[in-house]
Image (cartoon, rainbow, N blue to C red):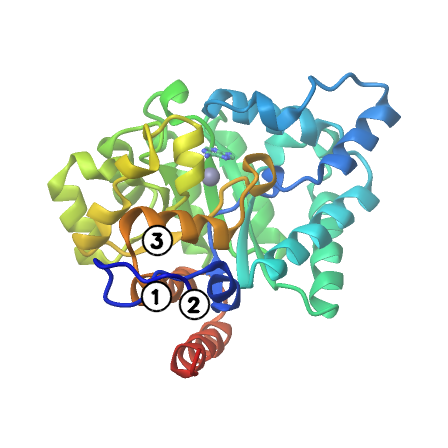
Amino acid sequence: MGHSDQGAQTPIPDRGWLLALPKAEVHVHLEGCLAPELVSSAARRAGAELPGDLEQGVHDLDSLLRTLDISCALIDTEAELIDIAYGFSRHEADSGVRYADVIVNPAHWPAWRGRLDSFVAALDAGFTAAETDGFTPVGICPSIGRDQSASEAVELVEWIVADQSERLVALSIDGNEEAAGRSSPRFADAFGRAAAAGFHRCVHAGESSGPEGVWDAIDLLGAERIDHGIRCVDDPALVAELARRGIALDVCPTSNVRLGVVSSLHDHPVEQLRAAGVRVSINTDDPFLLGTDIPAEMASVATTFSWGTDVVAEMARTSIDASFASAEVKRALQNELSAFLESPS
Ligand code: ADE
Ligand code: ZN
């Protein structure tokens, strides 16, 4: 256990406790989880020139999205996709994550355009092999980019619905809301179709957009979870609505600081939102590019806001409850979490 803090009811948790804490991750992009060695060897094979250290180039949302485009464009074999999926599941297991919803946006992977079946089949093979080896089970949330068209979005949903794979759990939307302008009306039809076919919905909003983007996510896209969502803090009525409806925010503290969404961790609204009764989980967004993992994210916010183990455990509970795992898996994980919290440390 870590040092205790005067303001905390329970001790501030240390990395060992955070690693062992049973939890889910619900906001992480596969595109941000490519091992640097895999990207360099793909670049060598393609004779492509990489712009130095990819991680160094990330300073705002646009540069992040460009970096994801550059690295994912190099991936054109099924073996690489299997490796990426397997490596992701192992990374999550190494962070003590017991279940993960992973966002995958096909628009970042041009080599697989028109071959979505093969793309997802290779990822599925990697996740299945990893799970067989005892690593973290994963659900895929196929994602629309904010700059795509309504018909591209509907096409993706039609593919998801036709695929019938249990691996696909939700429709997601990501990308740059600010650059796209108000885009949720364009995607309402796609999200409505996904909901009608029984798929969950998670929506990036309130990162590069303000509260109006979060309102649209709820009202037009039927979002069950908001990825980031932190700009809701600028609208007290929205904060109250999120709390009342129990819509969880999938918060990524390091990403928000690194991309300039907040000026420092200290200025991050996560504590204010938590105190207002909004359900919050802690996530990594693009961990390989941002050089982070869930225990590191939890440790940073716990230290910054003097959160004890009780507060962090509540966020782990939210991560499991808000995940798109099956009811059975969720129940088992909640029981694991309870047993962990009751066991003497
Ligand atoms: N894709 C990967 N990371 C993202 C983020 N933080 N916001 C929007 N789209 C993303
Ligand atoms: Zn994200």
Dot 3: what SS? helix
Q: Going by the image, does 143 lie left or right of 304?
A: right
Cβ–Cβ under 8 Å for marks 1 and 3: no
Q: Is residue 166 visible?
A: no
According to the image, label 1 marks what residue? 309
- Image height check: is 190 above or below 318? above
Residue 259 on image: x %, y %: 43, 27
Circle 3: residue type: Ala
Spatial separation of the CA atoms under disc 2 and disc 3: 13 Å
Labels 1 and 3: the sequence-earlier one = 3
Dot 1: what SS? helix
Circle 2: residue type: Met
What residue occupies the far left of the structure in this picture? 237
Cβ–Cβ under 8 Å for marks 2 and 1: yes
Residue 206 on image: x %, y %: 31, 35
Q: Is residue 65 visible?
A: yes
According to the image, label 2 marks what residue? 1
The local crowd at label 3, few if under 14, some if 14 to 19, many if 20 or more residues have their Cα within 10 Å, is many
Circle 1: residue type: Thr
Labels 2 and 1: the sequence-earlier one = 2
The local crowd at label 1, few if under 14, some if 14 to 19, many if 20 or more residues have their Cα within 10 Å, is many
According to the image, label 3 marks what residue? 302
Quadrant holding the N terminus? bottom left
Total numbered badges shown on the rendered structure: 3
Look at 69% across and 58% down and name the residue there. 127
Residue 122 on image: x %, y %: 76, 50
Residue 102 on image: x %, y %: 55, 50
Look at 49% across and 45% down and name the residue there. 284
